[in-house]
Image (tube, rainbow, N blue to C red):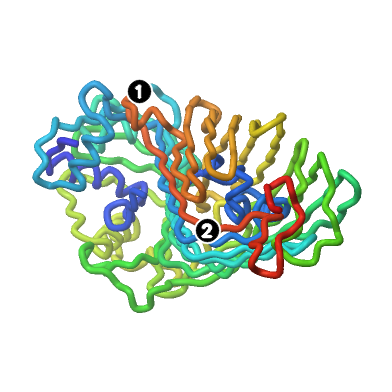
C-alpha cells in the first residue's frame, strides 16, 4: 500500500484516544473452521475442530496429524481494487522485496456502517486419534491467534486518522461500545468421545475436549463511550472518555523492535469444547470383531450435531498492564504534534493528558481474556454413492467487550469423497452479509482448501483471504494387513 510517513503517524495519533496501541507493536496479520476439512470422513481428528463428538464414526480408526495450518482475514473497512492489485501481487511484495509490481492502493468504504475486521490463524502440530469400539481418544498441540475489531465507528476509519479530514472537522461524535482485541496462545488438547447409545441404526455420541492453555500474548481495548468534537485541524476536544486497555505482549514496551521471551508464556488458563452428535445409520456395527483394524465402519444416512467450542480463557500476569480511563475528559491541543515512539511513551502521554500524571492510568498488572467462544450446529447427509451435503452454522457468544470474537458463519458444503480423492465446494454466508464460494481438495491424506476462492482467482475486490492445508496419516476401519494375524472380514473396503 502506498502511504507516506506523515499519514502513518497521523493515523496512530487519532487511534491514541481509542487506545489501540497494540496495533503498532503487536498486530499479527495472520480461522474460520475449515469446513472442507472437518466434514470429510477420512480426516479423523480434524472433525473435532467442529465438534469433539465427530471423533466417533470416522472412516479411520487411527489418525495422525502431521501439520494442519489455517490463515484467515476479512474486513468491511476497505479493499484492494482487483483491477490494480491482485492477491499474488501482495504475496510477491511480501516474499520478494526486490519485486517491482504495481502500486498497491487500498480503498475505504464510504458508507456509515460499523466497521469490523477478523484475523485468525491456526497451526496444529502432531496429534493422534484412536477409536476403539464405542469410544475414541485424541491428543494434540495447537498454536492459535485471533484478532478482532468490532463495531468501530465509521468516521475513525474513513478519516484515515487525519484531524483535517472533512468527516471530522467541525463535527461532534458520540460513539459507544466498540472494541479491539488480540489473543495468541498455545493449547494442549485432550479429547474423548463415547457412543452413549449404539442400538440398531441409531447412534448418540457425546464428546469433549479439555485444553491446557499457554498465553503467548494478549491485548484489548474497550471503549464504553467516547464523546468528542474536532473544532479545528489540530485540536481534539474529548468531552467524555470511558475506556480500558490491557496488554501482555512479547515486546519491550520501550522499543517496538525488541522481543521479550522471558517468560515465553505471559499467562495460563484452561478451556474446553463440548458436543453431542446424533447419527442415523444405514447399517450397524458388528460387536464380534476384536482387533481395532477389523472393526467395520457403519455408514450413515445423516448426522446432526451441536457443539459449544472454546469455553474458558487465559489470565495474563507476566509483563502485563491494565490502564483505565474512567469517564475522563480533556481538550487536547496540538494533537498533530504528538510523538508515539513506543508503548511506554504512548501510555504515559495518554495518562498525562487525562490525569495530569504519566503513571496514574495504570491500575493493575494482571487481566483475564476469554477464548472466542462459539455455538455451532452441524448437519451432514449422505446421498447414494460418494456424494454428501453438509450444513454448518456458527454463532459467536461474546459476553464481554474485551473478548476476541469470530464472525458468524452459515455454510452449505456439497462434497465428494473416496479413499483416494475428496473434494468439496463450500458456499458460505459470512457475517450474515457476504456470500463466498470456496473449494477443498484431498489426495489420500493431504488436503488443501480455501473458503474464499475468489481471492486466488482475482474475482472481486480483495477484502481478505482464507487458506488451509493438512498433512496426515491414517488407517481405515475394516482393513487389516493380511500378514498380521490374517485379514479382517469387512468386505465393504475390499479386505479378503
- Point out the frontmost of discs 2 and 1: 2
Picture residue at 71% right of the left edge, 33% below the top: 381
Q: Quadrant of the N terminus?
A: top left
Q: Is residue 276 left or right of residue 352?
A: right
Pointer 2 local density, CA inside 10 Å: few below 14, some 14–19, many at least 20: some
Secondary structure, mark 1, is: loop
In this orientation, does residue 241 appear? Answer: no
Secondary structure, mark 2, is: strand
Mark pair 2, 1: CA separation: 34 Å
Q: Is residue 419 left or right of residue 120?
A: right
Say the numbered circle drawn on residue 451.
Answer: none
Give the x, y percent position of residue 473. 52, 58
Picture residue at 38% right of the left edge, 78% below the top: 263
Q: 26 and 297: which one is in front? A: 297
Q: Quadrant of residue 408?
A: top right
Which residue is tagged 1? Answer: 459
Give the x, y percent position of residue 259. 27, 69
Q: Is residue 331 above or below residue 416?
A: below
First along the sequence among labels 2 and 1: 1
Which residue is tagged 2? Answer: 473
Picture residue at 54% right of the left edge, 34% below the top: 424
Q: Quadrant of residue 333?
A: top left
Amino acid at each position: 500500500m502506498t502511504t507516506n510517513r506523515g499519514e502513518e503517524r497521523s493515523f496512530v495519533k487519532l487511534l491514541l484516544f481509542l487506545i489501540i496501541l497494540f496495533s503498532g507493536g503487536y498486530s499479527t496479520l495472520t480461522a474460520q473452521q475449515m469446513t472442507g476439512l472437518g466434514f470429510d470422513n477420512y480426516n479423523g481428528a480434524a472433525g473435532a475442530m467442529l465438534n469433539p463428538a465427530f471423533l466417533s464414526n470416522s472412516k479411520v480408526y487411527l489418525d495422525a496429524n502431521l501439520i494442519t495450518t489455517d490463515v484467515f482475514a476479512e474486513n468491511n473497512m476497505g479493499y484492494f481494487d482487483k483491477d490494480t492489485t491482485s492477491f499474488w501481487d501482495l504475496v510477491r511484495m511480501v516474499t520478494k522485496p526486490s519485486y517491482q509490481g504495481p502500486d498497491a492502493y487500498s480503498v475505504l468504504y464510504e458508507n456509515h456502517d460499523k466497521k469490523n475486521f477478523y484475523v485468525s490463524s491456526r497451526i496444529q502440530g502432531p496429534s493422534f486419534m484412536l477409536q476403539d469400539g464405542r469410544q475414541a481418544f485424541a491428543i494434540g498441540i495447537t498454536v492459535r491467534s485471533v484478532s478482532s475489531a468490532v463495531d468501530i465507528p465509521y468516521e475513525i476509519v474513513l478519516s484515515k486518522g487525519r484531524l483535517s479530514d472533512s468527516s471530522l472537522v467541525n463535527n461532534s461524535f458520540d460513539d459507544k461500545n466498540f472494541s479491539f482485541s488480540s489473543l495468541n496462545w498455545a493449547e494442549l488438547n485432550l479429547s474423548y468421545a463415547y457412543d452413549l447409545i449404539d442400538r440398531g441404526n441409531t447412534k448418540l455420541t457425546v464428546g469433549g475436549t479439555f485444553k491446557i492453555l499457554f498465553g503467548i500474548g494478549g491485548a484489548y481495548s474497550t471503549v464504553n463511550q467516547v464523546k468528542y468534537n474536532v473544532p479545528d485541524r489540530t485540536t481534539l476536544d474529548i468531552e467524555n472518555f470511558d475506556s480500558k486497555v490491557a496488554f501482555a505482549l512479547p515486546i519491550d514496551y520501550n522499543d517496538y523492535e525488541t522481543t521479550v521471551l522471558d517468560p515465553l508464556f505471559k499467562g495460563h488458563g484452561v478451556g474446553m469444547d463440548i458436543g453431542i452428535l446424533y447419527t442415523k445409520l444405514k447399517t450397524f456395527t458388528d460387536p464380534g470383531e476384536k482387533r481395532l483394524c477389523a472393526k467395520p465402519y457403519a455408514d450413515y444416512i445423516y448426522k446432526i450435531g451441536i457443539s459449544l467450542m472454546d469455553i474458558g480463557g487465559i489470565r495474563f500476569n507476566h509483563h502485563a498492564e491494565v490502564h483505565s480511563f474512567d469517564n475522563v475528559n480533556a481538550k487536547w491541543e496540538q494533537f498533530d504534534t504528538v510523538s508515539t515512539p513506543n508503548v511506554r511513551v504512548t501510555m504515559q502521554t495518554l495518562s498525562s493528558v487525562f490525569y495530569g500524571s504519566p503513571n496514574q492510568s495504570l491500575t493493575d498488572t494482571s487481566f483475564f481474556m476469554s477464548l472466542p467462544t462459539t455455538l455451532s450446529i452441524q448437519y451432514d447427509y449422505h446421498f447414494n454413492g460418494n456424494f454428501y451435503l453438509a450444513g454448518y452454522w456458527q454463532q459467536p457468544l461474546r459476553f464481554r467487550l474485551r473478548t476476541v470474537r469470530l464472525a458468524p458463519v452459515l455454510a452449505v458444503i456439497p462434497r465428494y469423497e473416496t479413499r483416494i480423492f475428496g473434494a468439496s465446494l463450500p458456499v458460505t454466508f459470512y457475517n450474515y452479509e457476504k456470500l463466498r464460494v470456496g473449494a477443498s481438495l484431498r489426495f489420500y491424506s493431504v488436503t488443501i482448501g480455501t473458503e474464499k476462492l475468489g481471492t486466488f482467482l482475482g474475482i472481486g475486490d480483495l477484502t481478505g483471504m482464507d487458506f488451509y492445508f493438512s498433512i496426515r496419516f491414517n488407517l481405515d476401519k475394516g482393513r487389516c494387513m493380511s500378514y498380521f494375524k490374517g485379514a479382517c472380514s469387512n468386505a465393504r473396503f475390499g479386505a479378503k
